[in-house]
């Protein structure tokens, strides 16, 4: 029997952690199957319709097998002759560095994304179990909530198209620290939050603001509780920021002159209706967002968790009214329940920064965008700010469970059990679509291999895309890796088109050596190079024209 029933001892936290870990690990193959765990099977990556995961995979492969640079996060085989940071391929930089150190032990084709998904499921399960019990004091509920937390709708949406951002265990870890750090001294908090800052960068830098807000809120709460000097709030913040910046430096994020213009906040924000909008991937009917890009702020709670949240809000409202009738001031009520108040504040903060610079409810604009462009450009470092809604998503689920269990001591466990059971059909609807797709065996052959480019490549060393879309960049990036070549242009998280165009001009004017370069032209771009001295050839693939300083006998010159 669970601890929610009298007379039952608590499960040791280590056993609870392991139980949640195993449940999470068990859920992964139920959704995604086991084929993705084959490290040499990468056809599923190249046959996915979205280019993002191809970018992440090829970024990892090129980085892992490129020469070492300083800072160690730099490589140049996808942006030749310029260096690029592995941070800008969203390839989970920390694991990329580890596997680069171990590359002599790895097969040439090696994808770790399947195992990373399994690990993320397992660790999310472990941390969820600890979090729910920390808030409800009930082991039965903590294990009951593991599938709800692990199979969250934002995670199912992200895995697999933006794998690193599906590592929501980072958010759960920060929330667990937030609730657990009350008994820690200042030194320990500085160390732990410093490590968290480094961890965020090693997974994905968007986790920095998500976890940083929890850290700052926690320090303010401790200051109010313990009446410590205000300056102590700054020490963990400084450790967190310094560790994050140092890790970014080591991965070369500051060594690349990327173009941030055009990366203003706006459009990739969240919609205020996100918590009840399934976007067609749940039981509740979807509704239209104002912008199609507001899928970045997808945080559908599911029918069960929506019900639990509504019940929790009603109970809180009734409790607040009763306290006010008993003569309690609002300030006293907040101080008596300071962690509950802090959760409400954090939820509001996450919602505000995720919907910035305007507040939309469906297609209706409640607060228009009146933010100056300079501020939006400054905030464009985290342009897809809709993602910052995810901590609010988990806080709503966790807070609802805590409120219902606390304010309904006996009936609460049955209410939450019903909510979790109601959530399962909603999850199944989304997970079943994922399972049908990822358990189907797929085969991929690069079109550049299909048309026997090997007979043309000879001793060329560099592929130069003068023009081309994401599809061609992915094919060329894969082919370049397979044959030990470099590529000049790729799909990065930040724009280096200015550098690419400058280099193309130097190639065109023969200011850079080009004897070992094979040029790719699309959409008639070769016409601007007719006086460059190149030989041009019909390539026979999607209207591609090849250019070379050499004569290629096997291709018809045009």
Image: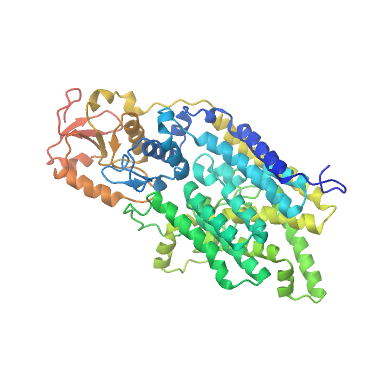
Which residue occupies 41% across, 60% down? 264
Which residue occupies 12% across, 41% down? 531
- Whether residue 501 can be seen here: yes
Query: For this view, does 484 lie left or right of residue 345?
Result: left
Above/below status of 254 relative to 523: below
Query: For this view, does 128 lie left or right of residue 295?
Result: right
Which residue occupies 68% across, 37% down? 23
Q: Residue furthest right?
A: 7
- Whether residue 363 can be seen here: no
Which residue occupies 55% across, 32% down? 437
The location of residue 523, given as percent across then percent down, is 26, 40
The location of residue 92, given as percent across then percent down, is 47, 43
Query: For this view, does 337 lie left or right of residue 365?
Result: right
Query: For this view, does 364 lie left or right of residue 480?
Result: right
Q: Nearer the viewer, residue 15 or 424?
A: 15
The location of residue 533, given as percent across then percent down, is 12, 38
Above/below status of 306 relative to 444: below
Above/below status of 315 relative to 411: below
């Amino acid at each position: 029997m669970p601890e929610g029933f009298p007379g039952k001892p608590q499960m040791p936290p280590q056993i609870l952690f392991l139980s949640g870990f195993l449940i999470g690990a068990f859920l992964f193959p139920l959704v995604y199957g086991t084929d993705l765990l084959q490290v040499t099977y990468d056809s599923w990556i190249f046959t996915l319709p979205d280019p993002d995961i191809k970018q992440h995979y090829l970024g990892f492969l090129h980085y892992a097998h490129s020469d070492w640079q300083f800072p160690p996060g730099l490589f140049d085989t996808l942006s030749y002759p310029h260096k690029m940071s592995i941070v800008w391929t969203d390839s989970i930089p920390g694991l990329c560095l580890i596997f680069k150190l171990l590359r002599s032990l790895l097969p040439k084709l090696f994808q770790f994304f399947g195992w990373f998904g399994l690990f993320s499921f397992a660790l999310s399960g472990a941390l969820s179990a600890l979090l729910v019990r920390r808030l409800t004091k009930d082991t039965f509920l903590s294990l009951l909530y593991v599938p709800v937390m692990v199979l969250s709708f934002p995670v199912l949406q992200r895995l697999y198209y933006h794998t690193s951002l599906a590592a929501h265990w980072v958010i759960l870890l920060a929330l667990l620290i937030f609730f657990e750090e009350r008994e820690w001294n200042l030194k320990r908090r500085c160390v732990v939050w410093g490590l968290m800052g480094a961890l965020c960068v090693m997974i994905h830098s968007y986790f920095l603001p998500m976890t940083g807000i929890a850290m700052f809120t926690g320090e303010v709460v401790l200051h109010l509780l313990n009446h410590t000097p205000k300056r102590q709030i700054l020490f963990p913040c400084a450790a967190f920021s310094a560790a994050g910046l140092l890790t970014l430096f080591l991965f070369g994020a500051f060594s690349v002159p990327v173009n941030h213009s055009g990366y203003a906040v706006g459009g990739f924000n969240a919609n205020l209706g996100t918590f009840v909008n399934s976007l067609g991937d749940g039981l509740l009917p979807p509704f239209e967002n104002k912008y199609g890009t507001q899928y970045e702020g997808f945080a559908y709670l599911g029918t069960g968790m929506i019900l639990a949240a509504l019940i929790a809000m009603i109970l809180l409202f009734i409790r607040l009214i009763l306290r006010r009738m008993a003569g309690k001031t609002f300030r006293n009520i907040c101080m008596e329940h300071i962690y509950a108040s802090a959760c409400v504040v954090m939820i509001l903060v996450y919602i505000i920064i995720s919907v910035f610079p305007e507040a939309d409810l469906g297609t209706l604009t409640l607060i228009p965008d009146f933010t100056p462009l300079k501020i939006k450009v400054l905030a464009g470092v985290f342009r897809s700010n809709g993602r910052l809604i995810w901590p609010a998503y988990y806080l709503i689920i966790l807070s609802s469970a805590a409120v219902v269990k606390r304010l309904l001591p006996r009936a609460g466990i049955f209410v939450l059990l019903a909510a979790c059971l109601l959530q399962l059909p909603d999850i199944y609807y989304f997970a079943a679509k994922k399972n049908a797709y990822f358990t189907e065996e797929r085969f991929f052959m690069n079109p550049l291999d299909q048309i026997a480019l090997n007979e043309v490549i000879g001793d060329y060393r560099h592929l130069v895309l003068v023009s081309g879309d994401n599809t061609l960049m992915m094919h060329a990036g894969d082919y370049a890796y397979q044959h030990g070549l470099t590529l000049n242009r790729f799909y990065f998280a930040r724009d280096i088109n200015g550098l690419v165009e400058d280099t193309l001009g130097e190639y065109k004017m023969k200011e850079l050596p080009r004897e070992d370069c094979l040029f790719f032209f699309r959409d008639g771009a070769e016409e601007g190079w007719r006086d460059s001295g190149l030989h041009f050839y019909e390539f026979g693939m999607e209207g591609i024209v090849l250019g070379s300083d050499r004569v290629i006998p096997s291709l018809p010159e045009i």
